[in-house]
Every structure is written in structure tokens, then in C-alpha cells.
Amino acid sequence: MQVISSIFTSRMISDYTIYNDEKLLSLLINRDDIAFSEIYRRYWPLLYKHALHMLKEEDESEDVVQEVFTKLWQKAATLKLDTSLGAYLYVATRNSILNFFRKNQFHHAYLTDIGQFLDQAQEITDYRIRERILAKLIEEEIERLPPRMREVFELKRKQNLSYKEIADTMDISELTVKTQMNKAITILRTKFGNHLSAYFIFF
């Protein structure tokens, strides 16, 4: 990509290597090309490894990661200061891989569930980034639950209501509450497996 090669040849990144992700992000938002170069240097190997694990092809993996960084530079000014840089890049890479699979109509051969991506996230050294990635994926999956099932699940999770209290609130039977809750848990466990246990305690 021309934008990336021109940035790398513009200036040396020098002492930018000592900056943490939060500082680099604030500089990136202000279109600092050296900050972008340091982010690229810091995250390229990790994201490429993720892509290669899923795509099995070096050229396609390079294209996917290159696209992620090109879009990062293009959208830099719109990012928020509280964005987790590692989580943002990882999710962007995941989405780019999924788009590649959809376009090539063979993603089912490689993706049986989102958990495969989570297994690879262990390479990310900052555990807080891993937690944010996992939390984001779980929340996205909860949003995809059928409306009544999601409502039951959220009343239990966020308000810690009993099955009877949920039944009264929603004007349904306790058996229906229990059934919907069990289905929600099954769906989430199918997607995330053991990764789910660190975030929820089910009753």
C-alpha cells in the first residue's frame, strides 16, 4: 500500500518506541505519521500471525493486515481516546478475515466458532487487551440472541433477579424463564466454550 510505504520512509520513529498504546493513539488521532509507524511495527507481526493461522496463505494474510492498517490511518481522526488500540486492531483483523471468507465462500471450512479467534488472542501480551476483546465479542453475541431470550438473560445478569422475579416482570412462567436462560447459555457456550466461564457465573 502506497500510504504505508510512504509513511515508513518519511522519518525515523526514534523514541516513539517508549510510548504506550494510549500515547500513540492520541498522536495517531492527530495524524502523527511516526506514531502510526510505531503502531505498525508493534502490531504487524501479531496480526499477521493471526491472519496466517486462519487463512493458511501468506499473500492473503499480508493483504488482510495491510488493509487493516490502511483503514486505521484513513480513520485515525475519527477514533476516540478511550479506544483500546490492541482490541481495535484485533477485531478489525478478525472482521477483515471474515469478509475474506465470505467473499471466497469457504469460511465454513475454517470457522466453526468464534472461539478459534480467542485461542489465538493468547499471543497478545497485555491481558487487559485480551479481556476487552473477549468482552466485546461476548456482548456482540448477546445482542444477537432472540429478543425475549436476551431480555431474560440480561435481567438475570445485570439485575440478578430470581427466575420468579423475571417471570413476574415479563409476565411469563418460571419454566419459560429457565428454558430461555438455558438456551442462551448453550448458545454462548457453543460460541465461546471455556472462555465464557471467566465472565459469567450461571445459576
Image (tube, grey):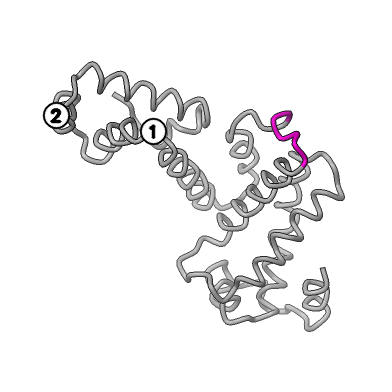
- SS at circle 1: loop
Q: Residue visible at 29% across and 38% down?
A: 154
Which residues lie in the magenta part? Answer: 104-109
Q: Residue furthest top?
A: 175
Q: Which residue is mark 1?
A: 146
How far from the left and from the top, in percent, is residue 2?
Answer: 83, 73
Query: Toward the viewer: 196 or 61?
Result: 61
Compared with 127, 85 (above or below) is below
Q: What kind of residue is marked 2? A: Glu
Compared with 127, 20 (above or below) is below
Query: Toward the viewer: 34 or 174?
Result: 174
Left or right: where does residue 143 sit relative to residue 6? Answer: left
Q: Residue visible at 25% across and 23% down?
A: 177
How far from the left and from the top, in percent, is residue 84?
Answer: 51, 60
Q: Quadrant of residue 57?
A: top right
Q: Which residue is mark 2?
A: 165
Q: Quadrant of residue 203?
A: top left
Q: Residue visible at 23% across and 16% down?
A: 175
Q: Residue visible at 46% across and 26% down?
A: 187
Query: Toward the viewer: 144 or 188?
Result: 144
Taking the magenta stretch, the answer to whether it contains residue 63 is no
